[in-house]
Amino acid sequence: MKLTTFGAARTVTGSMHLIEHNGHRLLLDCGTFQGKRDESYQVNLNFPFDPNSIEAVMLSHAHIDHSGNIPNLVKQGFTGPIYATNATIDLTDIMLRDSGHIQENDIVYVNKKRRKKGLRALEPIYTQKEAIQAMPQFRSLWYREKREVIPGVVAQIFDAGHILGSGAIVLDYQDEQGNPRRLWFSGDIGRFDMPILQDPVFPSGAQTLVMECTYGDKAHEHMDDAYDEFVDVVRRTVRRGGKIIVPAFAVGRTQNLTYFLSDAIENGDIPDIPVVVDSPLAINASDLYRKHTECFDDETWQFIAQHRMKGLDYHNVIFTRSVDESMALNDWKDPMIIISASGMAESGRILHHLKNNIEDGRNTILIVSWQAPDTLGRRLADQERKVRIFGEEYYRKAEVVTIGGLSAHAGQDILVDYALATKDSLEKIILIHGEEDAANALMGRLAEYPELPVPIYAEKGQQFEL
């Protein structure tokens, strides 16, 4: 078996990894690369392999950096099945539709600028219609269900505890001598103290571990500490009479935040102020979280029973679907919390809320997610005083607070334990989905354990014999 890392290699976006076994080809994830606009367009438009040659795709979870280029793969000739959990399929459906819609809108803006320079117009990488057309190729796999996805390779998905339906992909096969082999592809690894979802399943019996290292350079603070910090931010902003503006990923982070906020208000830890989820995608995703109760952990069921609620219907959370409802939030003068996509503040309604609130010193911009380089979210997290929104420059007066402990990604301590869980069989550790500092820090920690193989920080296009 051969593995080639074509995406999320020395970066945290665009997860895409090619498996070749006895002349057959399987793709693990097919994500969108996020970065500078021109570079992103070219990377996402052009695959480093022939899409017609791929026989099947396995999807670890629905986040766009893992799923977002599937419609383009189909558009360019891929006709095979796409395997994922039920919850992942439902989430991917709404996310790809949203992605296609955004690309259609963005290309209008791009082409206006190109026309002024005398350049030819570009087409969106895919449209909303093309995203919908890709969905019939999805096939459902339950956790731990075995399926031969290409000849000689039997796959399973194990709960990764990252977002609804997320999973590690496990491939069992035989080498040329007929010996059993196992590759464990972590996807994005969750945490043990996150709300709503089951804990991640650790690897076992793997010879090859392909593991994310997004937070390989730090161990997250305990969730209770992050909760306390979160509560403190809300309290002091309310005392100033300000608003808390939260750029949050529509899937995963938004649902965790509403869970935390509802609990904090119920417990009297923060004032009973409006909590507004202003993202149609996040609202649709929240509906799916309520649908897929098979993914809930015991603590969530206890929370639901204690508060006598149906599913996760919080009484203090307001969902705004229309543009008019979103715009009306600008006229609200009293303290409130606005959670809006996108998580890296690169598109969507969050840009309007930032534009309208960033120059008011009473307000707080709360960063609760990892921010990719060259994004507005990263510039805010880096405490830059001047930022551009919709092409105009704004002087930031709002306080910016980053709380890393709310991340849905495993920290360094869990990543080390994850690798150690399969140490008795492990021959190769391949690190992906992480920036250089994070990867180097994790490699240093893993090197402290002589029972582990020396990890490899994969480069784009690097091929491994497994």
Image (cartoon, helix red, strand yellow):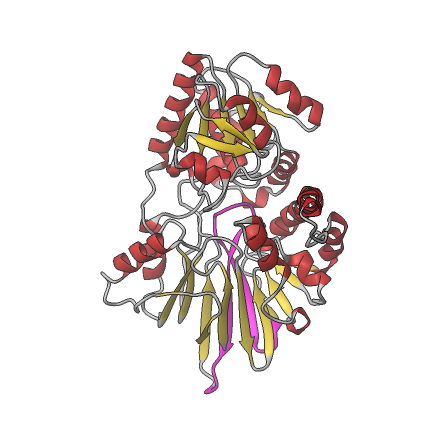
Q: Is residue 193 magenta?
A: no
Write down the region rendered in magenta.
149-177
Relative to 176, say whether 413 is above or below: above
Q: Give the side of residue 162 with respect to residue 282, left or right.
A: left
Q: Report the front residue among 446 and 367.
A: 367
Q: How many marks?
A: 0
Residue 231 x, y percent position in the rendering: 40, 24
Q: Report the front residue among 100 and 167.
A: 100
Q: Report the front residue among 59 and 13.
A: 13
Q: Tell me, yes or no, if residue 454 can be seen here.
A: yes
Q: Tell me, yes or no, if residue 309 can be seen here.
A: no
Residue 223 x, y percent position in the rendering: 37, 36
Q: Quadrant of the C terminus?
A: bottom left
Among the 4 quarters of the image, the one containing residue 329: top right
Relative to 238, say whether 302 is above or below: below
Residue 191 x, y percent position in the rendering: 41, 45
The residue shown at (48%, 52%) is 160
Residue 82 x, y percent position in the rendering: 65, 62
The residue shown at (60%, 19%) is 330
Among the 4 quarters of the image, the one containing residue 30: bottom right
